Image (cartoon, coloured by chain):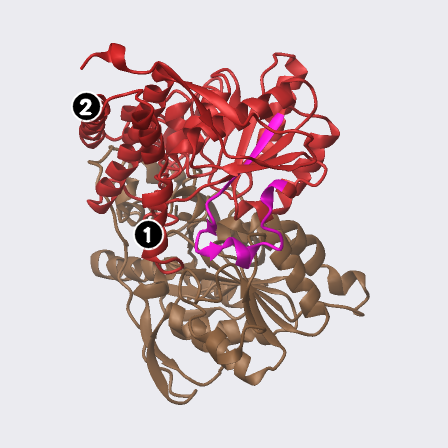
Chain colours: A brown, B red
Amino acid sequence: MAATRLFLRASPVKCSLTGLTGGVHSSLGLTLLKLSPACTAKPQAQRRHAAHFTYHPEPAPSQYGPTQKMNLFQSVTSALDNTLAGDPTAVIFGEDVAFGGVFRCTVGLRDKYGKDRVFNTPLCEQGIVGFGIGAAAAGATAIAEIQFADYIYPAFDQIVNEAAKYRYRSGNMFDCGKLTIRSPWGCVGHGSIYHSQCPEAFFTHCPGIKIVVPRGPVQAKGLLLSCIADQNPCIFFEPKILYRAAVEQVPTEAYQIPLSQAEVLQEGSDLTLVAWGTQVHVLKEVAAMAQEKLGVSCELIDLRTILPWDTETVCKSVVKTGRLLISHEAPVTGGFAAEISSTVQVRVRWEIKAFYFHRGWSTYGSL
Amino acid sequence: IGYGLLTSRFLSDLCKCDLHKLEEGPPLQAVLTREEGLQYYRTMQTIRRMELKADQLYKQKIIRGFCHLYDGQEACAVGIETGINLSDHLITAYRAHGYTLTRGGTVREIMAELTGRRGGIAKGKGGSMHMYTKHFYGGNGIVGAQVPLGAGVALACKYLGNNEICVCLYGDGAANQGQIFETYNMASLWKLPCIFICENNKYGMGTSVERAAASTDYYKRGDFIPGLRLDGMDVLCVREATKFAAEHCRSGKGPILMELQTYRYHGHSMSDPGVSYRTREEIQEVRSKSDPISMLKDRMLSNNMASVEELKEIDVEVRKEIEDAAQFATTDPEPPLDDLCNHIFYNDPPMEVRGTNPWTKLKSVS
């Protein structure tokens, strides 16, 4: 469930913690929090919520050549297609990728490039990633698929202990930089505890790997191609709820979107909103509602790369607005918002008198 | 009809099991009594109808989320249960509705759990993949993760000296997971009373066994663990093999592995039509030649152990039971919102968990 961390400027709104609890002042925090229906203390009638946001496609980029209408999984297929075409060492493997994958991300690739380049693995995540590390270390551009991010834990040891540390412990003699792990990620409405998880926070505790989460098809293709090209092992989490829901005009040629650069989607002056993946679209709507109902101008930032994250952009924005709200789907304790908020607090504390509190569920992500 | 004219018991021939590192296997003949036959028939028919009802409710969107159906494999659940005691332990993966029933659950509780209502066997919080009863440890979503757990349960049995065993089930897809082999080693090293059972229904989701496994002799995969392979569609075969395996474990010889060759009629789950990786003809052939319920029915009728009317009566009763259960499952209320954060931790006194803002604290009671 969404976890948010909120920084407040101490003055002039005079938002003390107690004031926010009790008062019905037009204090920023309380009213903002009232926007979310889940906020009310009274138990509501239980309704079934489907996708809680509308996807608004972004305008087609003009600098990368001709574009075609694609949804998220098609943009991933396109990125993989470009990779297999341009890099003869590229191989794609994972559970069920040969027929096209359970989310259709690899449709047509086996027929086009051959069964020695696009192949199924048995049901063994630890084996898949371990094998991928070896293949990458030997010089192949290895693109491994973990069928759901929830299943990545058997491979956790391989990722953290092997992939992330290979270059360091061999003094740069060996590395598995050519490894990219792709995995469907995030809440989807009917996934429950084992098809909805967002495990990025577990991996951010580990230097040596990069973690990227796109918000839409154009971003996905560019970021995935950057991950593949990047000389470090990367984990690319694809928001599964957007696979079909997000449709945009995506360039057909290969292009890259730089890693570790957050993107300011919307400029504002009162509050910085930070999110990644699906939550970006939720916060887009929040920003629109805040503007319309409260006259609050929000600056929306898509973090894009979770590790290493773009501290400059976020801090610069918080210096401007004085307030920060981060939203993510994973549980709040130890979620990545905690890291962002503590870093921002340290970096900009002399510019802002800020105190923060965080809100969010500490129960399982998809209940 | 005069029941006095019916046979009360009958000695049936059983299929021969393939053996691995075993001198001899289960007996080639077994006695089936009328009572047993009728009970197996009733239980298998209950599982079959329950699964078909779940299919119907899923298509009506009354059951949501994931639903992995067991129809076609009923002989495995029923045969295994009759080979062990209710005080023994069992753990399986997500295709668990049949086992929940044989291990003591009621159809009402199972269906209410599928629909996510408070009358469900896991209070509506588990769903299809997480059903539990006493001595039945689920109901596990992550493939292969239940096998080391099963070995742990077996260790507890050995440690407590209660002569109980643990039956630890997994599928042909899970047979390729690393943790299975780790478990084989531990169970064999410590001579744990654990029966590993691979329910080989020929397809791991959409991948046929030939495309996933270097060796499809799953009963030999335990290497140093003795194994047997048998027809999982014949409930008597399964029963005798399970009895044999249970005896092996209880006598302190350590673990044993069974491969049950079986088949599922539905796809992997309700989102899988089940015909893109196999032909309808294949499914039809299994249905007509090896259906477990039909096989038992023919056996009983041809040996004059039951009458057609009697079996029809059982069918009618089972149908009614399922209808009632479905009615309950559809009308029972959902769990209260207060339940949302319960049972995260064990806590004494009750714990408070953050809600969506710091001022709504949700109670977590265990």
The three-letter amino acid code for the residue at tag 2 is Glu
Percent x, y for residue A110? 49, 74
Q: Is residue A128 magenta?
A: no
Residue at image position (32%, 31%) is: B298
For marks 1 and 2, give the CA distance.
37 Å
Which residue in the protein does label 1 denote?
A: B271
What are the residue bounds of the magenta stretch?
A: B194-219
Residue B9 appears in the picture as rendered: yes
Percent x, y for residue B299? 35, 29
The three-letter amino acid code for the residue at tag 1 is Ser
| The N terminus of chain B - image quarter | top left
Which residue in the protein does label 2 denote?
A: B309
Circle 2 marks a residue in which chain? B
Q: Is residue B213 magenta?
A: yes
Determine whether the residue tagged by mark 2 lies in a helix, strand or loop: helix
Determine whether the residue tagged by mark 1 lies in a helix, strand or loop: loop
Residue at image position (70%, 33%) is: B186
In the figure, residue B67 lies in which quadrant?
Answer: top left
